[in-house]
Image: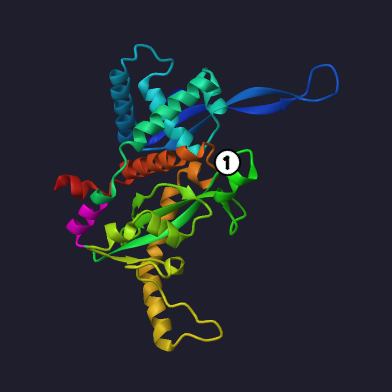
């Protein structure tokens, strides 16, 4: 893995990775043999984001008093961002760098932990909301696909979503009125309903003190949230209720952008390959990278 900006724009970074390909054995037919083939690709990321993570990793190395690493801090930062953006396997990234998969696993894990430790806290989001004068915040939930946790069915069942027929984790997102992603919660098992996750994270006590919270019908029954009207069984909504639902949907719909912004990092859009206790760290790392790219808290830092 190496960074190469030749003939690239100011926000493009080139990396190398490996893919297994099947090649026929020489001198006869039979089962094909697999070999590594290196290819070059690029991702778009702000140079300041790469420099920020590299500086954070240098601080981690100084704190650990590390004298030698196979990957320098800049390369380690690059492969960490590439892993979260593309969700390539450790073996594929390791082949592009010429190191062992175990070395790549440790390097990326260290980078993800460094990013997760710098994620914005909810009180920072509330400070920004007060400074901006927002009257309400947008709350939504999303499911992030994961591998099947555990060898036994009993261990897998809490993370199995009957709606999507796959193993997931539940993430609660808080967005600004224009749909800018501000906060992503800790990961809960995919079987958890949105209103249950709302109560588990104690969002009512933390959000409802100063702001109204707009949410969809999945939060029906949650205190201090504003949801639309649900059509009664065997009945119809009144014209006033339909008009109220239209206004509510127009205000709440930008919150769907927050989930899309979070899943721009393909590690959350495809499948997370990690243990259950590591899912929250992955989400926080992606949230930190999103804030480094979008910088919604510049106003807050300037205050």
Q: Name the residue under label 1.
A: 149
Residue situated in front as seen by the camera: 8 or 301 = 301
Residue 170 x, y percent position in the rendering:
47, 52
In the image, residue 74 lies in the stretch drawn in magenta = no
Residue at left 50%, top 38%? 86
Looking at the rendered structure, the secondary structure element under dot 1 is loop
Residue 230 x, y percent position in the rendering:
47, 77
Q: In this view, does 234 lie above or below 64?
A: below
Find the residue positioned furthest to the front. Answer: 154
In the image, residue 128 lies in the stretch drawn in magenta = yes
Residue 96 lies left or right of residue 260; in this view the side is right
Residue situated in front as seen by the camera: 29 or 94 = 94
| Quarter location, residue 133 | bottom left
What secondary structure is the magenta-colored segment mainly? Answer: helix
Crowd class of label 1 (few under 14; some 14 to 19; many from 20; radius 10 Å): many
Q: What's the magenta region?
A: 125-133
Residue 116 lies left or right of residue 217; in this view the side is left
Residue 8 showing in the rendered view:
no
Find the residue positioned furthest to the top. Answer: 67
Residue at left 46%, top 49%? 188
Residue 16 x, y percent position in the rendering:
51, 26
Q: Is residue 228 above or below residue 71?
A: below
Residue 63 lies left or right of residue 184; in this view the side is left
């Amino acid at each position: 893995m190496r960074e190469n900006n030749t003939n690239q724009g100011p926000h493009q970074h080139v990396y190398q990775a490996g893919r297994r390909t099947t090649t026929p054995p020489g001198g006869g037919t039979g089962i094909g043999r697999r070999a590594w083939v290196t290819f070059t690709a690029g991702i778009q990321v702000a140079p300041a984001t790469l420099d920020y993570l590299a500086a954070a990793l240098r601080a981690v190395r100084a704190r650990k008093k590390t004298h030698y690493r196979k990957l320098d801090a800049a390369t380690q930062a690059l492969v960490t961002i590439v892993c979260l953006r593309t969700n390539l396997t450790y073996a594929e990234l390791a082949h592009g760098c010429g190191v062992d998969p175990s070395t790549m696993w440790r390097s990326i894990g260290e980078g993800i932990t460094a990013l997760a430790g710098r994620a914005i806290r909810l009180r920072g989001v509330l400070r920004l909301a007060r400074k901006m004068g927002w009257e309400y915040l947008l709350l939504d939930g999303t499911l992030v696909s994961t591998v099947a946790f555990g060898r036994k069915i009993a261990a897998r069942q809490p993370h199995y979503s009957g709606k999507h027929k796959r193993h997931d984790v539940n993430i609660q997102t808080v967005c600004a009125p224009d749909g800018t992603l501000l906060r992503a919660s800790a990961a809960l098992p995919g079987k958890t309903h949105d209103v249950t996750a709302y109560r588990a994270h104690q969002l009512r006590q933390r959000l409802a003190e100063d702001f109204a919270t707009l949410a969809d019908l999945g939060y029906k029954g949650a205190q201090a949230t504003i949801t639309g009207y649900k059509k009664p069984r065997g009945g119809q909504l009144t014209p006033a209720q339909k008009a109220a639902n239209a206004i509510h949907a127009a205000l709440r719909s930008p919150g769907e952008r927050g989930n899309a912004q979070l899943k721009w990092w393909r590690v959350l859009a495809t499948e997370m390959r990690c243990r259950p206790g590591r899912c929250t760290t992955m989400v926080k790392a992606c949230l930190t990278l999103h804030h480094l790219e979008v910088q919604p808290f510049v106003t807050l830092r300037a205050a």
